[in-house]
Image (spheres, rainbow, N blue to C red):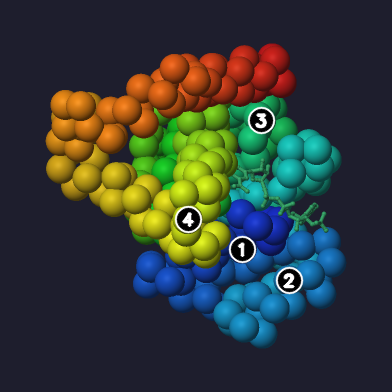
Amino acid sequence: MISKNIAIIGGGNLGSSIAKGLVKSGLMQANQITITNLELELIQHLKDEDGFNITTNNIEAIEGAGIVIIAVKPTVARGLLAQLNETLVSGDHVVISVISGIKIDDLEGFLGQMPIIRAMPNTAIAIQESMTALSFNEKGLQYKKEVVEIFDQLGSTMIIPESQMPAATVLASCGIAFALRFLRAASQGGIEIGFSSKLSQEIAAQIMKGASKLIIENNSHPEPEIDKVTTPLGVTIKSLNKMEYEGFSSSLIQGVVAGYNKILETES
Ligand SMILES: NC(=O)c1ccc[n+]([C@@H]2O[C@H](COP(=O)([O-])OP(=O)(O)OC[C@H]3O[C@@H](n4cnc5c(N)ncnc54)[C@H](OP(=O)(O)O)[C@@H]3O)[C@@H](O)[C@H]2O)c1
């Protein structure tokens, strides 16, 4: 049985968001989570304000934990993995890597045959609204239930074959930025037709939330929902057709595919 304590190696944006989300959800207590960073002062606030254990000593953090989440940038990941190799032990530890672009094969190359899970969340994990993709190696599948339980507390979870991880990175992880560009553009349009920037942004954010909930809660598809607001000879269809004429859907689709092609270049 793996210890429930969690070590988060790399207390940056994502690492600290995961830690906070787990405590907020009630799944873990702050004192069950140890967060590491190269410089202690950068994560001191996580101890002072949230009660997490903090350290600069990755080995010590791992020794006290069962689940080890590695959340450092890809540029420093290989050096770090080489250092952690001897401390991570199959049977004692489950490794969850959120590092973009480092495949399970590579992780096994560094760490040997042990339970390894690749997770691809997005920044909404900080408010427990991530869409997280998970892929497991053979040994990791044994811990599927526990790992899914962790990420279910932090939003929605999908299990995918690792071959789909680049696609998940673009649509689910970069997708937050795509959606925010829609929000920004809609609110800029709103200013042009008379709202203050604050109110315009509030409206744009709420329509995105409402539209998403209509799809998620009604298990619906966008088109029937769009049909409900497109009166013949009406305003909505006029706006939509102008947007499509200017390339709205097509630019989004091309943007998603461009990101995917870029990520395939980096991963191969
Ligand atoms: N942010 C996202 O939404 C997101 C989504 C999906 C995947 N990811 C992936 O998640 C990983 C982390 O992203 P992030 O945005 O959280 O990056 P980040 O904010 O830079 O966090 C990484 C942290 O790791 C620390 N660190 C570096 N080397 C370390 C070591 N040897 N031991 C302990 N800590 C170390 C860094 O410290 P210094 O700053 O002092 O170097 C930094 O605080 C990346 O691989 C990224 O691709 C991120």
Secondary structure under the numbered disc 1 in the rendered image: helix
Q: Which residue is mark 2?
A: 43
Q: Residue at x 47, y 55 (%)?
A: 194
Judge depth for marks 1 and 3 and give the one in front: 1
| Residue 11 x/y as whole percent | 69, 61
Q: Residue at x 81, y 42 (%)?
A: 76
Whole-number angstrom distance, CA of label 1 to CA of label 3: 21 Å
Placement of the C terminus among the 4 image quadrants: top right
**Nearest to N terminus: mark 1 or mark 3:** 1
Q: Check residue 16 in the rendering and tell me which mark sits there, or answer none.
A: 1
| Residue 158 x/y as whole percent | 36, 37
Q: Amino acid at mark 3?
A: Ile
Whole-number angstrom distance, CA of label 2 to CA of label 3: 25 Å
Disc 3 C-beta below 8 A from ligand 1? yes
Q: Which residue is mark 4?
A: 194
- Residue 197's quadrant in the figure? bottom right
Q: Residue at x 43, y 71 (%)?
A: 24
Q: Foreground: 76 or 245?
A: 245
**Nearest to N terminus: mark 2 or mark 3:** 2
Q: Check residue 102 in the rendering and tell me which mark sits there, or answer none.
A: 3
